[in-house]
Image: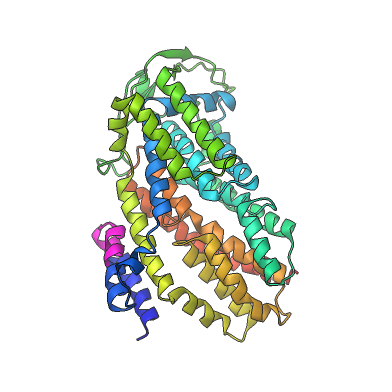
Amino acid sequence: MSPELISILVLAVVFVIATTRSVNMGALAFAAAFGVGELVADLDADGIFAGFPGDLFVVLVGVTYLFAIARANGTTDWLVHASIRLVRGRVALIPWVMFFLTGALTAIGAVSPAAVAIVAPIALSFASRYGISPLLMGAMVVHGAQGGGFSPISIYGTIVNGIVEREDLPGSELFLFLASLIANLVIAGVVFVLFGGLKLTSAPAHPAAGDGAAGAGRAGAATPRPTEQGTRPPAGTTTGDPEPTGTATATDTGTGTGTTLAETTPTLTPARTATLTSLAALVVAVLVFDLDAGLTAVTLAALLSALWPDDSRKAVTQIAWSTVLLICGVLTYVGVLDEMGTITWAGEGVGGIGIPLLAAVLLCYIGAVVSAFASSVGIMGALIPLAVPFLAQGEIGAVGMVAALAVSATVVDVSPFSTNGALVLAAAPDVDRERFFRQLMIYGGIVVAVVPAVVWLVLVVPGFG
């Protein structure tokens, strides 16, 4: 048995054990990386740790720490109420606002994980407060980021168009952008309908019962929400909104129903003002000065902690440590696979197939599966050159094939093992994280199974380009 095949079988065993025994998959993946790396790939510790996602570790810890402080001092409460007033009480519009907001950020040049890191914590805090499915809200944020991700001035668009030019392939920047935007927009519409978006059109613009302020008629009470399974959430997760201090009454819900709903609205305190300033500084630092989102978030969180240490002590326990272990472990093992050539081995095997259309759909699936665990840009950079030999035969349109590979490799970023999916999982307050992880994994699996075939049928088979 080849080393590459052994590494794939070990990965399958990790999935089975983690699913059936409720063991943290990251811990199993670290063990698998050690075993396969040392015994099969002949890697030393440095070679194994080369795949450790240090930048993602800092992003997950930094962003969840900063927004845990924002939750602890009531800043997210203030943002949620401000959002409701902005859309005049139309709760159903909020998921779409988040979709187009992240899409606009990536379209003008933000890295997709940076845009998700900025928007997801606010979006999911809103979802928690107003009883919106966290899967719906998280998917809208991620698909929005990918929808705008291939504009001609975006990071993804610039990279892919550069690869196409380097490989001397026909290309269309507009076609690539529209293909990704339309694909993600359609998926977002389906998700909105399937996961309760239509019911939000008649939802009242006040918090769900039992969810913090105004919940169950108790203004200002901090009542923990039960988890979806009716059990205590895992250690390290939040169990309710902080008790708001200094509230005012807002009576205009903007729902158009003619009813008046009393709702407590948090006011700005010095801590909340400083936190809002920090969040704005995070956006400016990432989008304008191109600073690292994780390091910036950690720095801002440290400054807030020095000024308000009580909030910091609460926030440290709310960093999504189990998610950090999960994601870093799995990606370390994927790094071992890449180091030992398993990913290249699979891609070259498919590229050698003599039937161009079959090879095209298999490359789309390889891009989707691998990208669900690894860098989308890295996968596109590897797969597009692999497609060059049969694109040169003229039987497959290069423009459509490149667009299909790009969509397949990025639309799956809703997977909890990808950077964007991990940020959504880590940012969700008041959820049973194990259940939410399984939901994201199932949804990501459905996307991996369906989308590559659909984009192949729509973009490759007609022979665009």
Q: Is residue 285 magenta?
A: no
Q: Residue at x 30, y 67 (%)?
A: 45
Q: Is residue 289 above or below residue 326?
A: above
Quadrant housing residue 32: bottom left
* Residue toward you, 452 or 289: 289
Quadrant housing residue 255: top right
* Residue toward you, 132 or 273: 273
Give coordinates of residue 338: x percent, y percent: 43, 71
Which of the image's four quarters has the C terminus? Answer: bottom right
Q: Is residue 24 magenta?
A: yes
Q: Residue at x 57, y 65 (%)?
A: 380
Give coordinates of residue 161: x percent, y percent: 68, 61
Residue 283 seen in render: yes
Q: Residue at x 38, y 50 (%)?
A: 57
Horizontal side, residue 199 vs residue 8: left or right: right
- Scheme of image coloration: rainbow
Horizontal side, residue 37 vs residue 113: left or right: left
Give coordinates of residue 75: x percent, y percent: 43, 26
Q: Which residues are magenta?
A: 18-31
Residue 133 seen in render: no
Q: Residue at x 52, y 65 (%)?
A: 368
